[in-house]
Image (spheres, helix red, strand yellow):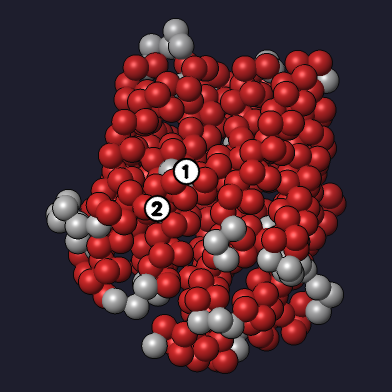
Amino acid sequence: MRRSFGWRAFAAVGGMATTFLLSVIVVRSLDLQEAAAFFAILASISLGPLVGRLGLGYNVIRLMGAESDALRRRQIAATHLHATALLSVLSAPFIALIGCVALIGHSDFLPVMVMTALLIAVESTRLILSDIFAATGRVRASVATMHYARNMAALPLVALVVLIAHRPSLLAVIATYCAVSATQVVIALVHARHEVSIFRFSSGVATLRTTIGQGTKLFSLDFSEFMLRQGMVWLATAAFSSLAATQFSATATLATQVTLLDSLFALAVAPTAARLWAAGQKSRVIRILSDAATMNTLIAIVVLTVVATLGPFVLEVAYGPDMRTASSLLLILTAAGAFQACFDGSITLLVISGNITAASRTAVAVLAVALPCACVAAWMGGPIALAVVVLASIATKSICMWLVARKVVGVAPCAHLNPIRAFRQLTSDRDDVAETRATA
């Protein structure tokens, strides 16, 4: 687990930096319509793998983490990979169309939509491979197949395309993304041949039948997270002017980076927590999740402080004077990450303990209230009102998940006031030894 935290922390730093630089390049080089469309397409690229994997990312980590037989693990991995490929191919065109709505009437609408659909299908396959690598303990392979690595590889190529093009276009940027992601998936498939029976389509069908219902419930967790974050970019694109939509979309994309470490810590912890929970070491699982929440919360507070003090200056220097007024949006949306960091370890606990239905119902209930409120806020209150609704919705979901975990499990992880102890325990050798014993 110590190696996992180290590699994922490196990926988080690189991912945040490259996402920021890519957004700067897009805003400064493309016109407002294409820039707003780019952020909407990024949102669709996030939603596409959620639909394509249908919650099977969580499921493959949970099932493979608790399975001791190597052949059985390969069958589980193959089933989830094949299901993801099929679902993503079927759903990608529809999700791409939603992401490209802002380009309707644009000369590049059709080729951009086709490229986006292809990118969504490729991204879904890449992400399930990353989950499979995480479940088998191949930390570096899991990190290398995440979108942070894709962004780091795409940044210099996108910058080169923008520099040499007479008129930089959104189509060129998306095509570059697609080429990088496809290369990443091909390499990942080669390295995954020992973990998954890629070409044995008959293996593991029974496993899929018994777990697809759980996968659907797990999908609701991913979908609610998406709609409360990237989904609001679609709403902003539909409700606001090109400038206001670009401001909201750019700040929402930047604010989402605060949750990167939260997601990375969850991925680092989940396989270990699943193995320890299956081995009956429940108190150790709670401690690990609480320590991870503590480190996440500390980082979120530091980032929030930096945004509050330097946000206006950084936005103006990076994006231009028109973006300075978006600093309030960035501060509000970033604050939501602190609530997620503190309480979202409860989601991991609910999943690995088998209380998937309780987590799913909570996520759906919060989303059912949040979406109408967001629509009213966008059309009647503007960007600031929408940002406040996003903050309140995310905070409500995180706190409700914590309360539900306390009710159904009896205890729930939460951030504590000793980050030094949390760091030492997360990076100690004892957890690596415990994990090894749990899998023996």
Question: What residue did someone put label 2 on?
Answer: 211
Instruction: Locate residue 366, reporting x and y percent.
Output: 71, 38
- Left/right placement of residue 222 relative to residue 403 reads left
Q: What's the residue at 76%, 39% (across, down)? A: 393
Rendered image quadrant of residue 287: bottom right
Describe residue 438's horizontal placement relative to residue 258 as left or right. left
| Residue type, mark 2 in image | Thr
Q: Position of residue 61 (x, y in %)?
A: 43, 63
Please report whichever mark, 1 or 2, sits nearer to the chain's N-terminal start.
Answer: 2
Establish if 193 lies above or below 25. below
The vertical placement of 167 against 255, above or below, is: above
Q: Position of residue 282 (x, y in %)?
A: 62, 78
**Element carrying mark 1:** helix
Secondary structure under tag 2 reads helix
Q: In x, y percent, where is residue 254?
A: 65, 44
> Which disc number belongs to residue 216?
1
* Residue 367 position by quadrant: top right
Give the Cα separation between the discs numbered 1 and 2: 9 Å
Residue 365 appearing in the image: yes
Question: Considering only vertical position in the picture, is 86 above or below 407?
Answer: above
Most extreme residue toward the top is 105
Residue depicted at x 15% and y 56%: 200
User: Which residue is depicted at the point 42% across and 21% down?
Assistant: 97
